[in-house]
Image (cartoon, rainbow, N blue to C red):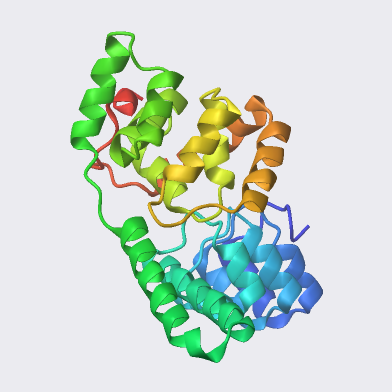
Amino acid sequence: MLAQSERLTEADLVAIAKSKSNAHLLAISSRTQISVPVSDILVERGDLQVKQQLAKNTGAKFSEAAFRTLLKDDVLADVLRERLDLPLDLLRELLTRAAQTVHRRLAANAPSEIHEQIEETVVGVAHEVNWEAMRPRDFSAAMRAVQAMNDSGQLSETALALFARERRYEDMTAALSLLSDCPIMLLERLMKNLQPDGLLVACKVASLSWDTTQSILRNRFGHHAMSPADLARARESFAKLSRAAAQTALDFWKARDLKAAPSNEVTHPAFAAG
């Protein structure tokens, strides 16, 4: 009942979350939609299992304070990296934390005389990854160009693959936006997310081959190359993902964004009509 009932109001859920057992909190954390006031209490009172389920729940909304609380746990931080609604400043913190973890691992196994060199290298890479991932992008020209290519029948997977190989980020993002029928701002969030799952969805909807998808994954960040093991896992996930399932996921994200977007939001030309 707690997990599925539509009769329970936000006030009901807040009252239950404040007073009932962890089992009740776990049931609430699996609801398809969870508001910020409810998630705040679940984060405050729930155990690790509740928080993990909540973090994985794409229908849950979080305050920045709740996000920060969850990010204190490394296990939960790994889950939250996959969320499209994670604020960019918190994603930046995760990138920095990841760099520090790499530093510790390298230093633990390296001769003491090169520790300083390791630190300088890791800090430099972390700074460049931060800038590459977070700097603002202007897609206006790219959107006009790929729309013109599409109108003239020149926009194809081959053109997109070329954009990826040449690391023409704006053109690559705009082209995939049009080919997958995904709003440009949503697709950019998929591009920036360190976890590739959301981007695999867009590539599958666009009916791209693995070769082109892999090229996009490899070239979306100038200084964040995916390891062979990560690419192998992504390839397996991409092979298992059906186009129908990918379309369902993308439609859900688009609908969620539409509800949250202000009425004057600028959209990709492909979505202006609807």
Whether residue 250 is visible here, answered yes or no, is no
Closer to us: 130 or 64: 130
* Location of residue 69 in the rendering, given as x and y in whole percent from the top left corner: 54, 80
Q: Which residue occupies the extreme top position in the image?
A: 152
Whether residue 152 is visible here, answered yes or no, is yes
Q: Residue at x 31, y 22 (%)?
A: 273
* Location of residue 22 in the rendering, given as x and y in whole percent from the top left corner: 77, 77
Q: Residue at x 36, y 25 (%)?
A: 274
Q: Residue at x 43, y 86 (%)?
A: 116
* Location of residue 163 in the rendering, given as x and y in whole percent from the top left corner: 35, 31
Quarter of the image for residue 3 reads bottom right
Q: Is residue 115 above or below residue 251?
A: below
- Quadrant assignment for the N terminus: bottom right
Horizontal relation, residue 199 to residue 167: left or right: right
Q: Is residue 231 above or below residue 164?
A: below
Q: Residue at x 36, y 65 (%)?
A: 130
Query: How many labels were placed on the picture?
Result: 0
Horizontal relation, residue 153 to residue 99: left or right: left
Horizontal relation, residue 36 to residue 165: left or right: right
Q: Which residue occupies the extreme left position in the image?
A: 141
* Location of residue 223 in the rendering, given as x and y in whole percent from the top left corner: 41, 57
Quarter of the image for residue 80 reads bottom right
Closer to us: 136 or 103: 103
Q: Which residue occupies the extreme right position in the image?
A: 23
